[in-house]
Image (cartoon, rainbow, N blue to C red):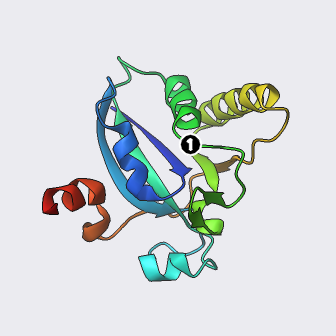
Amino acid sequence: MKTFIGGIGCFWDEKKYEGIKGIISTECGYCGGDEPNVTYKAVCGGDTGHIEVVKVEYDEKEKSYEDMVNLFFELHDSTQVNRQGTYVGIQYRSEIFYNTDEERQIAEKVLNEVNSKLDGKVSTKVTKEKNYCKAEAYHQKYEQKKSLKY
């Protein structure tokens, strides 16, 4: 089992990973800032450096890290700067967090390929994972919980 962490806008978009072969689980969280633990309220303030991310556990027998990076680009609009649709703010930026040099190289390779196809308009950052923390329980599987109410 391997892990991929990416910011595709609001972390409630974790639902976009549902039903994809090789995806084992998802978790909403925060990553990229200076503090090891943050809250939703602090991240929404926009000055923690953290962004909302989805941590995806996947079966490396079914998907490669490169497959996950390609999927990341398929699931959101990487040309939007500090936003995704109606979600606006630095905490919604497009960003891939890597842990190894190999992951960095793969992420940068795919980013460059996508950027070439999109005439240099990709805003996605590739950054070393820093201070990932799980989001509050009420954010986990939020869209699923919301749909059960209606």
- Identity of the residue drawn at 68% across and 27% down: 110
- Identity of the residue drawn at 42% across and 21% down: 63
The percent coordinates of residue 18 (x first, y second) are 31, 37
Identify the secondary structure beneath mark 1.
Answer: loop
Relative to 20, say whether 57 is above or below.
below
Residue found farthest to the right: 119
Q: Quadrant of the N terminus?
A: top left
Residue found farthest to the top: 61
The percent coordinates of residue 144 (x first, y second) are 23, 53
Relative to 128, say whether 34 is above or below.
below
Q: Which residue is mark 1?
A: 76
- The reply to whether residue 27 is visible in this rendering is yes
Residue 108 falls left or right of residue 51: right
Quadrant in the rendering for residue 92: bottom right
Relative to 90, say whether 68 is above or below.
above
Q: Quadrant of the C terminus?
A: bottom left
Residue 124 falls left or right of residue 1: right
The percent coordinates of residue 20 (x first, y second) are 34, 28
- The reply to whether residue 39 is visible in this rendering is no
The 10 Å Cα crowd at callout 1, few under 14, some 14 to 19, many 20 or more, is some
Choose between 55 and 78: the one closer to the eye.
78
Residue found farthest to the front: 150
The percent coordinates of residue 45 (x first, y second) are 57, 82
- Identity of the residue drawn at 59% across and 55% down: 84
Badge 1 amino acid: His
Residue 149 falls left or right of residue 79: left
Relative to 148, say whether 49 is above or below.
below
Choose between 54 and 80: the one closer to the eye.
80
